[in-house]
Image: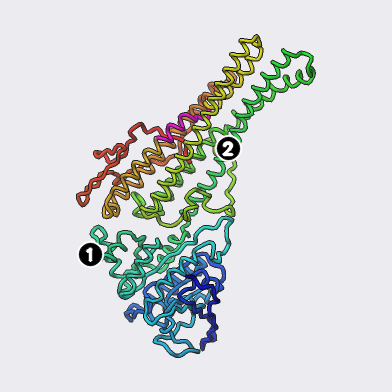
């Protein structure tokens, strides 16, 4: 049970005149209450420094000092991060304290340790002096190092939780804050800490060359094709989001690595910004296009209705109807001219295709699969450059793109954001399946149900008005048949340019393909799921299904728009329109499929999907056709 009593808080004055707070929670008190008692200044990320107070080789101290002072502490300061370590004046805690002091103690540095281990000026009992540059100490009940480990990770969870954390520059829609762990040196207890980071899906940066457990994990990671015999180490290597930083690397490399892991990656940030702008403007163009098309259909139906009324009742509002009938053809001409001039339908398709293509590359990048295994930032920047260049060589370049307002939540709202996706963190295969594959699968299924209801409603209305026209003819009111015919024609045109039936078919095909991929993945043994070849196959085939769905949707909508314009345009303009629509291209980067195959031969594991797995060239083929449609 939780304890709602007040947590004990006391001030500690160090000889260097630095004042810190010591929090002494009871075992029954929740981490959320501890966060409240800490009274932290606003922050944007949480760093866990692992390795504790274990002794470090004296020869490494100069290099590690530079790493902490010029690398980790600087990154923490620029990221407005809270830092959590062991709080003692030894090992990584001492180095972190020195690093924070070098930045003018601008970061929240919290030491979490057993209450009986640290020595404070006002409580001289214990084993190890408390590091004086810490701003807070959380002292867990217990007499051994490791009794505080659970509290350290529970506190981390509470700090990143948007419902309890003191987030700086809070957006309108709060999301979970980024966190990461950095392992330097470390003894036997550090393997448990590393294992907890993996199980909590916290990115782990291992400093190779710092000695101890860090070097053991780094060595095992480089040999990850053969998992270690130790079960805890095997789980760390198989499931961990691990980055290795050599102590011999330039100092600024660790700062860049940290920024990338917590979402400070400028390339990924710019990719999301471009997606957000394309997505926003695609929605705007779609809305305007649909308003114009519905306006054209409505004017046609209204004109027919007034003509029938004037025929049936010549004296009813004769002058008013006369002038309205003069104005309606003029209004219709204006709407058709605006549609052909502004080409909002084409712009909608191009911007939507560009946005979805960018999003596919973002998810590929975040998994680190295929071509993104080496120099991922350079690869992503090339892809985004190619997509944007091709998009802006179309009608889109005649439009001023409105920039997305980040205060509404960034990245833009997606169904996955409800599931805890921040849009920047690394995606393990399990998270990719949940946040990408399963999310899109749910989207297709929900939209299919909605589309079917819409199609059935329109067809029933069509049947109803058709029957009504027959009835009117039978009872001698043939004049009204023109109106029922106009309504039926309007609904048919609406169905035609919306491509509702084709979209429904393709949504079902895409959903089936994604279910087959998910089935194939779940059927793999755990060691096969950690095989890079299978991870590549999972990502590539999922994105191929989504890309083929989008490509076919764009082509179908292009054809529908071309047909619609031919019906609306004067004959003299049709040749020009043919030339215009022939330039509509899907802004998709050239595809490079590497190692993508459903049959994994490593370790004698064979896996295939009920879709069609082409073992010869390693590509997925849709059992129906590659015609998919309607991007999310």
* Numbered badge on residue 333: none
Whether 586 is drawn above or below 195: the answer is above
Residue 206 x, y percent position in the rendering: 35, 67
* Numbered badge on residue 285: 2
Classify 10 Å Cα crowding around label 1: few (below 14), some (14-19), many (20 and above): few
Residues at discs 2 and 1 in contact (Cβ within 8 Å): no
Residue at 36 percent across and 60 percent down: it is: 241
Whether 241 is drawn above or below 330: the answer is below
Classify 10 Å Cα crowding around label 2: few (below 14), some (14-19), many (20 and above): many
Residue 47 x, y percent position in the rendering: 45, 68
Residue at 56 percent across and 68 percent down: it is: 42
Q: Quadrant of residue 225?
A: bottom left
Over which residues does the magenta segment extend? Answer: 497-508
Query: Would you say 62 lies left or right of 571 here?
Result: left
Task: Check the image and tell me how it is coloured.
Answer: rainbow
Query: Would you say 527 lies left or right of 128 here?
Result: left
- From this viewpoint, is residue 107 visible? no
**Magenta includes 59?**
no
Q: Earlier in the sequence, mark 2 or mark 1?
A: 1
The residue closer to the viewer here, 371 or 601, is 601
> Residues under labels 2 and 1: Cα distance?
57 Å
């Amino acid at each position: 049970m939780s304890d709602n009593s007040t947590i004990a808080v006391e001030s500690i004055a160090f000889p260097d005149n630095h004042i810190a707070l010591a929090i002494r929670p009871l075992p029954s008190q929740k981490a959320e209450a501890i966060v409240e008692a800490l009274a932290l200044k606003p922050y944007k990320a949480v760093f866990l420094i692992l390795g504790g107070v274990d002794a470090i080789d004296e020869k490494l101290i100069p290099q590690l000092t530079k790493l902490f002072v010029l690398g980790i502490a600087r990154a923490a300061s620029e990221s407005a991060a809270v830092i959590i370590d062991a709080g003692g004046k030894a090992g990584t805690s001492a180095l972190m304290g020195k690093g924070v002091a070098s930045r003018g103690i601008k970061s929240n540095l919290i030491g979490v340790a057993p209450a009986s281990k640290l020595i404070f000026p006002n409580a001289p009992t214990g084993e190890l002096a408390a590091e004086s540059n810490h701003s807070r100490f959380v002292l867990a009940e217990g007499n051994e190092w490791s009794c505080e480990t659970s509290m350290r990770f529970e506190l981390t969870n509470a700090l990143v939780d948007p419902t309890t954390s003191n987030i700086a520059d809070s957006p309108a829609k709060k999301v979970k804050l980024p966190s990461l762990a950095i392992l330097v040196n470390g003894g036997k207890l550090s393997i448990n800490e590393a294992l907890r980071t993996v199980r909590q899906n916290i990115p782990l940066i291992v400093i190779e060359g710092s000695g101890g457990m860090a070097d053991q994990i780094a060595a095992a990671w480089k040999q990850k094709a053969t998992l270690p015999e130790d079960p805890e180490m095997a789980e760390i290597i198989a499931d961990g989001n691990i980055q290795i930083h050599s102590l011999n690397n330039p100092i600024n490399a660790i700062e860049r690595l940290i920024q990338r892991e917590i979402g400070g990656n400028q390339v990924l940030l710019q990719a999301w910004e471009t997606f957000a702008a394309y997505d926003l403007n695609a929605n705007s163009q779609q809305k305007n296009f649909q308003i114009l098309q519905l306006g054209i259909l409505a004017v046609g139906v209204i004109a027919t209705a007034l003509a029938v009324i004037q025929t049936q009742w010549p004296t009813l509002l004769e002058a008013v109807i006369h002038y309205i009938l003069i104005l309606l053809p003029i209004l219709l001409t204006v709407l058709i001219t605006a549609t052909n001039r502004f080409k909002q339908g084409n712009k909608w398709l191009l911007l939507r295709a560009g946005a979805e293509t960018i999003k596919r590359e973002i998810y590929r990048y975040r998994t680190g699969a295929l071509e993104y295994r080496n120099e991922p930032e350079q690869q992503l920047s090339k892809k985004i450059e190619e997509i944007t260049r091709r998009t802006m060589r179309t009608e889109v370049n005649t439009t001023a793109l409105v920039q997305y307002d980040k205060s509404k939540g960034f990245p833009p709202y997606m169904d996955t954001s409800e599931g805890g996706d921040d849009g920047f963190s690394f995606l393990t295969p399990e998270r990719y399946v949940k946040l990408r594959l399963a999310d899109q699968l749910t989207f297709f299924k929900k939209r299919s149900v909605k589309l079917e209801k819409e199609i059935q409603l329109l067809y029933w209305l069509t049947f109803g008005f058709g029957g009504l026209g027959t009835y009117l003819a039978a009872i001698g009111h043939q004049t009204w048949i023109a109106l029922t015919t106009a309504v039926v024609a309007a609904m048919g045109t609406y169905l035609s340019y919306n491509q509702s039936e084709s979209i429904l078919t393709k949504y079902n095909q895409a959903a089936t393909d994604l279910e087959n991929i998910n089935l194939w993945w779940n059927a793999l043994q755990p060691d096969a799921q950690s095989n890079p070849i299978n991870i590549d196959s999972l990502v590539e085939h999922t994105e191929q299904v989504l890309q083929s769905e989008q490509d076919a949707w764009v082509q179908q909508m292009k054809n529908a728009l071309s047909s619609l314009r031919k019906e609306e345009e004067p004959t003299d303009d049709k040749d020009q329109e043919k030339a215009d629509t022939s330039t509509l291209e899907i802004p998709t980067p050239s595809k490079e499929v590497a190692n993508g195959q459903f049959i994994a031969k490593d370790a004698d594991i064979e896996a295939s999907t009920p879709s069609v797995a082409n073992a010869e060239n390693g590509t997925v083929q849709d059992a129906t056709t590659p015609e998919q449609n309607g991007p999310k």
